[in-house]
Amino acid sequence: MSTPMPPQPDFPPPLPTEPPKPSKSRTNAIIIGSAAAAIAAIVTTGIVVVQSNDGDSKPATAAESTTPGEDMVTAATEEPEPEPTYSEIDAESFTIELRTTERQCFGSAGCNMTVEPRLTYLGLTEDIDPDVVYEITYEIRGGESGPVIKTAELSDRTSLNYTPSVISTASASSKVSVEISDVIVQGQ
């Protein structure tokens, strides 16, 4: 005895839907094709930029890509920095005073004093060329022996080299003055 079978439906049941998987060789071909297109676009863009720079007197600023949707490439141009300019330095560029570092008086015989120049530049320090040496000649007046001419050297914008001066005056009330007479630029 056999058991009756239920009746079969008129159409087969639907199969579960899965997207078809691409074959590995097709996937590899797509990846290789995309990479080749990107490389070709980069090489073409580089050639266009180089050719633009070689043929023109003006540098190229941009080149179009041959692949749609790629960004534009800007060629970097380097311009040389302008040579710095410095102010013309002369005697009127400074003020000068004397600083007394030692004083010894001998009553009515007068005084011996040691003085040093104190210079002030009237402009901005950045206006002074750091690669040159400025020889600043100055004259000290008021000593018993007459005017004393000395030179100080200004280098590296702020370094002042000088030799202190010993001055003899007639009395303790004698006034000593100083004036810049010349500035010579060394090292240009």
Image (spheres, rainbow, N blue to C red):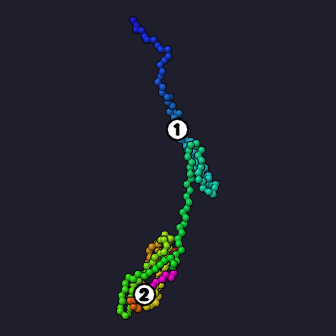
SS at mark 1 in the image? helix
Toward the top, the furthest residue is: 1
Residue 95 in the image: x percent, y percent?
47, 78
Left or right of 187: which side holds 144? left
* Amino acid, disc 1: Ile
CA neighbours of label 2 inside 10 A, class few (<14), some (14 to 19), many (20+): few
Toward the bottom, the furthest residue is: 108
CA neighbours of label 1 inside 10 A, class few (<14), some (14 to 19), many (20+): few
Pointer 1: what residue? 31
User: Is 41 in the magenta?
Assistant: no
- As displayed, is residue 14 above or below residue 72? above
Residue 149 in the image: x percent, y percent?
47, 85
Front residue of 108/36: it is 108
Residue 92 in the image: x percent, y percent?
51, 78
Q: Residue at left 43%, top 10%?
A: 5
SS at mark 2 in the image? loop
Left or right of 139: which side holds 72? right
Q: CA distance from mark 1 to mark 2?
A: 94 Å
Q: Which numbered disc, 1 or 2, marks the residue closer to the eye?
A: 2
Q: Residue at left 56%, top 44%?
A: 70
Toward the front, the furthest residue is: 173
* Amino acid, disc 2: Lys
Residue 100 seen from this side? yes
Left or right of 92: which side holds 63? right
Residue 168 seen from this side? no
Residue 58 in the image: x percent, y percent?
62, 57
Quadrant for the N terminus in the image: top left
Q: Residue at left 54%, top 69%?
A: 85
Q: Main secondary structure of the magenta part?
A: strand
Pointer 2: what residue? 175
The segment highlighted magenta reads 174-185
